[in-house]
């Protein structure tokens, strides 16, 4: 029976290091608050002008190489991002051209922080049905472009000035601080490959969605509800920036991630003790500690990257995978669980033997 395995991975983290202390120079916040309430200590942002596609190209190349393949072996692309280079087309086709792939199908998926778990289901289904043999699955984000900062704030962060920013910028940044402190930029990719042997492969997926309360985490502007879809009035209302009801999202994330993890384990007859590693989406360390405690998992089986990268949305889980596999923490046959929750609202889990 053909199953899908993750045969290789790659990652690319941009160079600009933004500490919590640096953010505290442009808004009312503190290193202590950000660390305690979210777990983020530092995040990496791109240099102005570097796009999500640009970040993902080296990650994808590395994934293909580490799978022992060449670009011409790839027969499908799944690209998960909520921060594409263009409103249209999606980044999948752009990556196909940038890597010089054959004219293979390219899917763009929009499940935000659940992008990787949804993408793995899509890739697995194609591999198992024989429609594809080598799927390039990418999760990449440039969130810094969604930071609603003015020029003085950017200059202060870059160290170009050390004078206080104007009061109106300070107030606006402070109004949005619950979002601004959480996010980082990053890209990662895996190659999902057909495997006909025993003891390895993706075993199951549990993915779901409920759009009832989509507007607890969304970008209200720049869509077809408006004619024209973007105008000055919309920008004046600041509707181009993400909006989030943090407490609501926190509660939903803990509930849905815990449910997804418990259900997928139960229906596969797997006990938490049987797992080698759990890779959880990195939105808030407290969310993951809650799920870890509920499942009774020791620290050794749960890894984090939120402290150094912040929330990189679709990239969090493949970044964790890449780091863990390079560190020798994922051996063939190991039972690995992934779990995520994102805007939509959407959530999911994958269970696999690595
Ligand atoms: N610095 C200092 N104080 C802050 C900050 C900050 N950065 N942000 C909020 N506060 C303040 C609030 O203003 C509030 O002050 P008040 O009591 O005077 O009104 C106080 O801290 C508590 O606010 P809460 O919103 O209750 O803070 P909470 O502990 O819930 O933490 C946070 C906020 C970090 C946003 C949390 O709710 C969270 O992580 N939510 C989930 C985020 C998430 O999962 N997003 C989904 C993924 S994103 C995606 O799919 C794209």
Image (cartoon, rainbow, N blue to C red):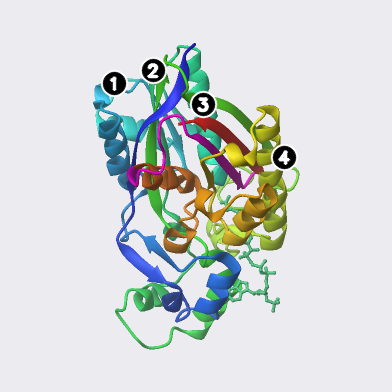
Q: Earlier in the sequence, mark 1 or mark 2?
A: 1
- Give the quarter of the figure containing the C terminus: top left
Q: Where is mark 1, residue-wise? A: 73
Q: Is mark 2 within 8 Å of ligand 1?
A: no
Q: Is residue 255 above or below residue 133?
A: below
- Mark 1 surroundings: few (<14), some (14-19) or many (≥20) residues within 10 A: some
Q: Position of residue 22 (x, y in %)?
A: 41, 77
Element type where label 1 sits in the image: helix
Residues under labels 1 and 2: Cα distance? 8 Å
Residue at 57% of width from left, 52% of height from top?
298
Which residue occupies the extreme front position in the image? 273
* Magenta span: 326-344
Left or right: 86, with 258 as reference point: left
Q: Where is mark 3, residue-wise? A: 202
Q: Position of residue 269 (x, y in %)?
A: 67, 29
Q: Is residue 225 above or below residue 311?
A: above
Q: Is residue 3 above or below residue 21?
A: above
Element type where label 2 sits in the image: loop
Q: Is residue 224 magenta?
A: no
Q: Where is mark 2, residue-wise? A: 133
Q: Is residue 327 magenta?
A: yes
Q: Earlier in the sequence, mark 1 or mark 4?
A: 1
Of the residues tagged 2 and 3, which is closer to the observer? 3
Element type where label 4 sits in the image: loop
Of the residues tagged 1 and 4, which is closer to the observer? 1
Q: Are discs 1 and 3 less than 8 Å apart at CB?
A: no
Residues under labels 2 and 4: Cα distance? 32 Å
């Amino acid at each position: 029976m053909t199953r899908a395995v993750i045969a290789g991975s790659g990652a690319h983290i941009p160079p600009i290091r933004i500490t919590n202390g640096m953010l505290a120079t442009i808004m009312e916040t503190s290193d202590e608050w950000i660390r305690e309430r979210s777990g983020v200590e530092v995040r990496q942002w791109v240099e102005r002008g570097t796009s999500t596609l640009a970040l993902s190209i080296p990650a994808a190349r590395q994934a293909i190489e580490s799978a022992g393949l060449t670009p011409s072996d790839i027969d499908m692309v799944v690209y998960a991002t909520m921060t594409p280079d263009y409103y249209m087309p999606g980044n999948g086709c752009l990556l196909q051209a940038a890597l010089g792939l054959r004219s293979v199908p390219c899917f763009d998926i929009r499940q935000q922080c659940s992008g990787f778990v949804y993408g793995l289901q899509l890739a697995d289904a194609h591999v198992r049905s024989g429609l594809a043999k080598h799927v390039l699955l990418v999760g990449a984000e440039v969130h810094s472009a969604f930071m609603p900062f003015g020029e003085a704030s950017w200059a202060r962060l870059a160290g170009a000035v050390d004078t206080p920013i104007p009061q109106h910028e300070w107030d606006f940044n402070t109004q949005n601080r619950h979002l601004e402190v959480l996010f980082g930029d990053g890209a990662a990719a895996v190659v999902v490959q057909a495997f006909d042997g025993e003891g390895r492969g993706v075993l199951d997926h549990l993915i779901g969605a409920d759009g009832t309360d989509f507007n607890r985490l969304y970008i209200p502007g720049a869509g077809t509800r408006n004619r024209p879809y973007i105008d000055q009035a919309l920008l004046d209302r600041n509707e181009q920036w993400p909006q989030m009801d943090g407490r609501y999202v926190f509660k939903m994330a803990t509930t849905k991630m815990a449910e997804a993890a418990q259900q997928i384990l139960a229906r596969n007859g797997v006990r938490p003790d049987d797992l080698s590693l759990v890779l959880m989406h990195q939105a808030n360390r407290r969310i993951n500690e809650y799920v870890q405690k509920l499942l009774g998992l020791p620290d050794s089986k749960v890894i984090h990257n939120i402290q150094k990268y912040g929330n990189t949305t679709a990239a969090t889980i493949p970044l964790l995978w890449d780091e863990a596999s390079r560190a020798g923490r994922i051996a063939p046959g190991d039972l690995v669980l992934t779990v995520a929750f994102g805007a939509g609202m959407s959530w999911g889990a994958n269970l696999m033997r690595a």
